[in-house]
Amino acid sequence: MTTTSYALQTSHLVKRFGGFVATNDVTLNVAAGARHALIGPNGAGKTTLINLLTGFLEPTSGSVTLNGEEVTRLAQHQRVKRGLARTFQINRLFADMSVLESVTLAVCERRGLGARWWQPVGAHTDAIAEAAALLAQLKLLDVAHHQTKSLAYGKQRLIEIALALAMKPKVLLLDEPAAGVPTGESRALFETIAQLPREVTILLIEHDMDLVFRFADRISVLVNGAVLTEDVPSVIATDPRVKEVYLGEAAHG
Ligand code: ADP
Ligand code: MG
């Protein structure tokens, strides 16, 4: 018998905004190596939960545990140091730098070479090699020398993921990575994400159910800040309560 080890857990997590309960007693266990999806209608509290996990928000009560260590009161950068990464916002991309330079800079930052940013990027041979390997993993090598701003949006989202992976995370949080990406590009984007090594545990928020069911091996359904149910995709797909939640959302636009 094997015991499951968890990369990321919450226990009875609560977040109130004034009288409003955005996160309602959420206990979540994300197994190491999982492809875990968090779904739920608009306003269910998915982004709030991610913000509690990263330390962007402080919970009202409850706890967050990363690789067995409680991190509930740790600052964002302390959690990053312990292996928790989320994708960068699009405006954090360095528009005028090449893809390779951007990712190399992130690798240098992790290696503590960040203070010497004014040195030519070419001085950091090892960091460049590591960045190039990441680009290969994300199928971005062919655009390595393009300016990030010149790339299609789907490719830009992959660069954000490359920047997050440059931190060598154990857990990667992806909040709607395909948001704003044209449908034609989102399938390829997800295929690339799905091929990331299993050493990286992924918790994904995604609206497109086709993509979710293709990607996830575990799904938690959030409604009104609380976990409605959690199970393997085949069980979630046939759960009438889940269907009802989404039909309700469609009916109300
Ligand atoms: P989702 O990502 O599932 O669409 P959110 O986590 O963004 O949902 O929001 C959940 C609920 O919490 C929403 O009703 C939203 O209006 C509310 N909310 C989120 N952030 C704040 C905040 N800083 N102050 C007050 N209410 C908030
Ligand atoms: Mg959201």
Image: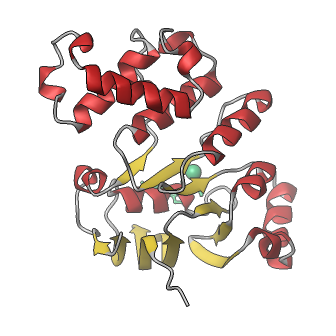
Which of 180/174 is in front?
174
Determine the residue positioned at 49% across, 37% down. Answer: 161
70 displayed left or right of 237: left
Quadrant placement of the N terminus: bottom right
In the image, residue 114 sits, relative to residue 3, either above or below, namely above
Residue 19: tell me if it is visible: no
Location of residue 192 by image quarter: top right
Q: Quadrant of residue 188?
A: top right
Identify which residue is drawn at 41% across, 33% down.
163
The residue most toward the left is 115
Q: Is residue 145 above or below residue 188?
A: above
Q: Which percent across, then down, holds residue 71?
A: 27, 68
* Residue pictured at 41% horizontal, 70% vertical: 15
Residue 57 locus on image (x, y percent): 34, 58
- Residue 18 against residue 47 in the figure, above or below: below
Of 239 and 250, the residue lying toward us:
239
Q: Is residue 76 left or right of residue 143?
A: left
Camera-nearest residue between 57 and 66:
66
Count of numbered circles on the image = 0
Image check: 185 left or right of 123? right
Closest to the observer, 142 or 161: 142
The spot of residue 190 in percent (x, y) is 68, 41
Q: Is residue 140 visible?
A: yes
| Identity of the residue drawn at 84% across and 71% down | 244
Q: Position of residue 170 (x, y in %)?
A: 40, 56
Q: Quadrant of residue 92?
A: top left
Give the colour scheme of this rendering: secondary structure
